Amino acid sequence: MTTDAFPTRRGRMEYVCTQCGARRGVEELLYTCPECGGVFLLEDLDFARMKERPAEEWRTRFDARRATRNTALRGIFRFYELMAPVLEQEDIVYLGEGDTPIIEASPALQKALGARFAFKNEGQNPSASFKDRGMAGAFSYLRALVRMHGWDEVLTVCASTGDTSAAAALYASHVGGGIRSVVLLPRGKVTPQQLSQPLGSGALVLEVPGVFDDCMKVVEYLAEHYRVALLNSKNSWRILGQESYAYECAQWYGWGLAGKSLFVPVGNAGNITAIMSGLLKMRELGLIDELPRLFGVQSHHADPVWRYYSRPEGERRYEPVRVRPSVAQAAMIGNPVSFPRVKKLAARYTEAGGDFNVVQVTEQAIMDAMICANRHGHIACTQGGECLAGLLRAKELGLIGERDFAVLDATAHALKFSGFQSMYMENAFPPEFGVTPRPELINTPRLLITPERRAELNEAEFTAETARELARAAGLKSR
Ligand SMILES: *Cc1c(COP(=O)(O)O)cnc(C)c1O
Ligand SMILES: [Zn+2]
């Protein structure tokens, strides 16, 4: 078999309701269970047949595809058989998503923090966040639907904390052919960089006063009353695409995740759902021998999942929270859509011998961690900082020991959240964030020469004087 050949075996996929267990076929795009309103997960009824081949054979196959020239298998669909084995090659959308590197933290940083860890740089995806994984899944399925039904127009809609809309607009504009993108944003609650993305991709960008949870309610109502393709994480094809993160982690470490702890920021909880689901599948097939430890991380300003798990079993009760301003803005969600999925999968995860935890961190800790990481050669966004803060918190709580190695999900590129970095450097956080910069981490530009002084000098004088000023600022000695 050449590594370029697209797989021929097709599975039989169904939506399964996480609440009542109802099943539905995938000929239609469904978001919630018609029986009970619960959220779906997707299941391949023939998944168990993968066990007819030894795990080693699957590992070899997935490893071989790292060299493929077939772009349908280069991104998240390197793991086609584990994810959506009903799609045809012609449906697959590939914009360079997935296959992101895991970069070990600089030795100085690991030493300074007394922890062993690496970042998986999800900011190296095409729209600079992990959301592209899910969109590659959702848009590939959408193309299959368009082909099967012969539709000539599809309107995709999503509510977003910024990155979902950036990804949705990017994929919609590339696929084209009657697929249009509408995104709904909470006004002023996404960064200027994130806002520029769907605008640049030509999406219809609409804003409402309020927070993400308000936008979510609007698009849910819309999906109930109009024919639209919803691209929020109620769309279980996105969850499926995001499972690729887990497969890549395992593959990066030679299919061994024993002794590893994965840290994931939790907002709408789609990502942690996908990662758990992927890990469980690999464990079931024997692709990995042991489940890694899994840590969800939430800010104290948006922590419904942490609140739920912080109570002893038996006393747990889920309650949405009203969010407060958070630098981990992409995870600033008070009523996560995927909470029922998390509950279900976390129970299965622990049954299968895995360890599932949620830790809570402060806004201050998130910012300090982000800045500190990036001063050591990383490109962590605020949510990546949240993961690092989560690792330090877990260490403080005695949940992480000297020998543990953590893989932190740096979910987006630092550049998307540079405004928070600026607020830190300029000590300009509005009081509701509760963030005060650590003086040693502040870094601001300095003007070497005033325009007035420059106007007094000729070119040679300007060059010499400015160079002398630079040497003084940098503490250089003359030769
Ligand atoms: C969406 C997002 C999150 C939160 O992921 P969920 O799946 O909503 O829990 C975290 N970080 C970034 C950068 C995101 O875009
Ligand atoms: Zn149901």
Image (spheres, helix red, strand yellow):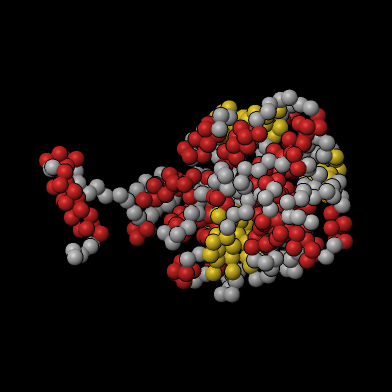
Answer with the quarter of the image where residue 355 lies. bottom right
Query: Percent x, y for residue 416?
Result: 49, 44
Question: Residue at image x 66%, y 43%?
Answer: 94
Quarter of the rendering occupied by the C terminus:
bottom left
**Can residue 276 be seen in the rendering of this structure?**
no
Query: Percent x, y for residue 452?
Result: 15, 39
Question: Residue at image x 56%, y 43%?
Answer: 127
- Number of residue marks: 0
Can you name the residue that lies furthest to the front here?
Answer: 2
Q: Against 198, is 433 above or below?
A: below
Q: Against 394, is 121 above or below?
A: above
Query: Percent x, y for residue 108?
Result: 44, 69
The answer to which of 478 and 15 lies nearer the viewer is: 478
Answer with the quarter of the image where residue 335 lies. top right
Q: Is residue 17 left or right of residue 104?
A: right
Q: Against 208, is 475 above or below?
A: below
Answer with the quarter of the image where residue 161 lies. top right
The answer to which of 65 and 33 lies nearer the viewer is: 65
Question: Residue at image x 19%, y 43%?
Answer: 450
Can you name the residue that lies furthest to the left here?
Answer: 456
Quarter of the rendering occupied by the N terminus:
bottom right
The answer to which of 2 and 351 lies nearer the viewer is: 2
**Can residue 422 be seen in the rendering of this structure?**
yes
Question: Residue at image x 76%, y 55%?
Answer: 2
Query: Percent x, y for residue 408?
Result: 57, 60
